[in-house]
C-alpha cells in the first residue's frame, strides 16, 4: 500500500510538472513565473482571461484546453487498453487493434462528411464503435465467451471498417477529404473549453465503473471457470465492459480523431511497477497515459517549424516499435517455456 501511494504521488507530481512544462513551450515560449501568474489570475476570475493580453490568451484559450484534452485522451485510452487486455487475456489487445477505434472513426468520418458537428459527431462515433463490438461478438461465436477469437475478430473488423472509411473518403469532395485525413491522423488543434466537458465526464464515469469491477476482473484473469466458480457472470460482465470501453473510445475519437497504440503500450509499462492487480493498475495507467500524451502533444507541436505534426503519426511511430519489441519478448518467453 505504501509503495502504491508513493508511485501515485510521484506520478501526480510528474503530471503537474508535465502540464506546466507543456504550457511554456511552443512558438511563443513562456516562463514558469508567467504561467503561474496567468493561471492564478484566470482560475480566480476565468472570464477575465477571455479577452485578456496575448500571454493570457495563449495559455488559457489555446494551450491549456489542448493539454487537458491530451491528458484526458491518454488516460482514457490507457485504461481502455487495461480493460481490453484483461477481458481477452491477450497482451496485444487495445482499442486500435481491437476494431473499436476503427468503428468510431467510421461513424465520425461519415458524420463529418455530411457536415455533422458536436453531439451529432459524438453519437455517430459511438454508434460506429458499438457496431464494431456487435460484429466482434457475432464473429467470435455469438457470445462474449469465446475469448480466444475476440482479438482475431477485432482485427478482421478493424480492416473491414477501415475499408468502409476509405470508401467514404473516396466519395467525398477534395476539401472534405483533406480535413478528414488530418482528423483521422489525430489532432488536438481547435480544442476549446467547451470540448472538454463530455470527454471528462465520460472518463470519470467509466473509470469508476472499471474500478468497481476490479475484483471480478482480477478473477477473470485466472480463467472463466475460476471466475464462474466464484459466482461471477463472466459472459454478461465481459459484454457490458466491452460496451463501456467502446463508449469511452468513441467519445475520445470523436473529439481528437484516431490515435493508436496508447492502449497497447501504457498497460504493459505500468504492470512493470504494479503487477496485474486492477485496483493498483488502473490509477497508475490513468496517470501514465495522461502524462505520455501530454509529452506526445508537446513533441508534435514543436518538432516542426510553423506547423503541428498529427498526434497519430507520433504514437504510431513509438507504438509500432513497442509492438515489435513486445512480440519478440513473448516469442522469447515461449521458447524458454518450451512451447
Image: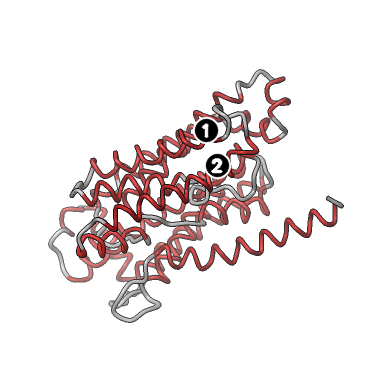
**Is the C-beta separation of discs 2 and 1 under 8 Å?**
yes
Q: From the viewer's side, name the closer residue of 106 and 322.
A: 106
Compared with residue 238, is residue 92 higher up or lower down, i.e. above or below? below
- Give coordinates of residue 231: x percent, y percent: 66, 18
- Give coordinates of residue 81: x percent, y percent: 54, 47
- Mark 2 crowdedness (10 Å alpha carbons): few <14, some 14-19, many ≥20: many
- Give coordinates of residue 320: x percent, y percent: 56, 64
Q: How many marks?
A: 2
Residue 17 lies left or right of residue 270; in this view the side is left
Q: From the viewer's side, name the closer residue of 339 and 236.
A: 339
Residue 265 lies left or right of residue 68; in this view the side is right
**Residue to which mark 2 is pinned:** 153
Occupied quadrant, residue 238: top right
Q: From the viewer's side, name the closer residue of 179 and 3.
A: 179
Residue 272 lies left or right of residue 186; in this view the side is right
**Residue to which mark 1 is pinned:** 137
As helix, strand or loop, the secondary structure at mark 1 comes to helix
Occupied quadrant, residue 237: top right
Residue at (52, 44) in percent of width and height: 154
Separation of marks 2 and 1 at Cα, in angstroms: 8 Å
- Give coordinates of residue 203: x percent, y percent: 41, 41
Q: From the viewer's side, name the closer residue of 39 and 68.
A: 68
2 or 1: tag closer to the N-terminus: 1
As helix, strand or loop, the secondary structure at mark 2 comes to helix
Color scheme of the displayed model: secondary structure
Q: Residue furthest bottom?
A: 305
- Mark 1 crowdedness (10 Å alpha carbons): few <14, some 14-19, many ≥20: many
Q: Which mark is residue 48?
A: none
Residue at (42, 39) in percent of width and height: 204
Which quadrant would the N terminus be assigned to in this image? top right
Residue at (35, 58) in percent of width and height: 184
Amino acid at each position: 500500500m505504501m509503495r502504491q501511494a508513493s508511485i501515485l504521488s510521484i506520478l501526480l507530481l510528474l503530471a503537474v510538472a508535465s502540464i506546466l512544462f507543456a504550457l511554456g513551450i511552443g512558438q511563443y515560449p513562456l516562463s514558469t513565473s508567467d504561467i503561474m501568474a496567468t493561471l492564478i489570475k484566470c482560475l480566480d476570475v476565468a472570464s477575465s482571461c477571455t479577452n485578456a493580453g496575448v500571454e493570457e490568451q495563449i495559455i488559457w484559450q489555446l494551450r491549456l484546453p489542448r493539454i487537458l484534452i491530451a491528458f484526458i485522451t491518454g488516460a482514457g485510452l490507457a485504461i481502455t487498453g487495461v480493460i481490453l487486455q484483461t477481458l481477452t487475456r491477450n497482451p496485444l489487445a487495445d482499442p486500435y487493434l481491437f476494431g473499436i477505434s476503427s468503428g468510431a472513426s467510421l461513424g465520425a468520418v461519415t458524420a463529418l462528411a455530411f457536415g455533422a458537428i458536436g453531439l451529432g459527431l459524438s453519437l455517430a462515433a459511438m454508434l460506429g464503435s458499438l457496431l464494431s463490438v456487435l460484429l466482434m461478438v457475432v464473429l467470435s461465436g455469438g457470445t462474449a465467451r469465446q475469448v480466444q477469437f475476440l482479438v482475431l475478430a477485432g482485427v478482421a473488423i478493424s480492416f473491414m471498417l477501415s475499408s468502409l472509411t476509405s470508401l467514404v473518403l473516396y466519395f467525398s469532395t477534395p476539401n472534405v477529404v483533406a480535413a478528414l485525413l488530418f482528423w483521422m491522423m489525430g489532432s488536438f488543434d481547435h480544442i476549446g473549453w467547451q470540448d472538454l466537458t463530455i470527454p471528462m465526464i465520460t472518463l470519470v464515469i467509466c473509470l469508476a465503473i472499471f474500478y468497481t469491477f476490479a475484483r471480478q476482473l482480477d478473477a477473470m484473469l485466472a480463467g472463466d471457470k475460476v471466475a464462474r466458480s466464484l459466482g461471477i457472470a463472466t459472459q454478461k460482465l465481459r459484454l457490458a465492459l466491452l460496451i463501456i470501453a467502446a463508449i469511452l473510445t468513441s467519445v475520445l475519437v470523436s473529439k481528437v480523431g484516431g490515435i493508436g497504440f496508447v492502449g497497447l503500450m501504457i498497460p504493459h509499462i505500468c504492470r512493470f511497477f504494479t503487477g496485474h492487480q486492477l485496483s493498483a493498475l488502473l490509477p497508475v495507467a490513468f496517470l501514465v497515459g495522461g502524462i505520455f500524451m501530454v509529452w506526445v502533444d508537446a513533441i508534435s507541436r514543436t518538432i516542426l517549424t510553423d506547423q503541428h505534426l498529427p498526434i497519430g503519426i507520433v504514437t504510431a511511430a513509438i507504438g509500432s516499435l513497442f509492438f515489435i519489441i513486445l512480440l519478440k519478448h513473448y516469442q522469447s518467453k515461449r521458447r524458454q517455456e518450451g512451447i
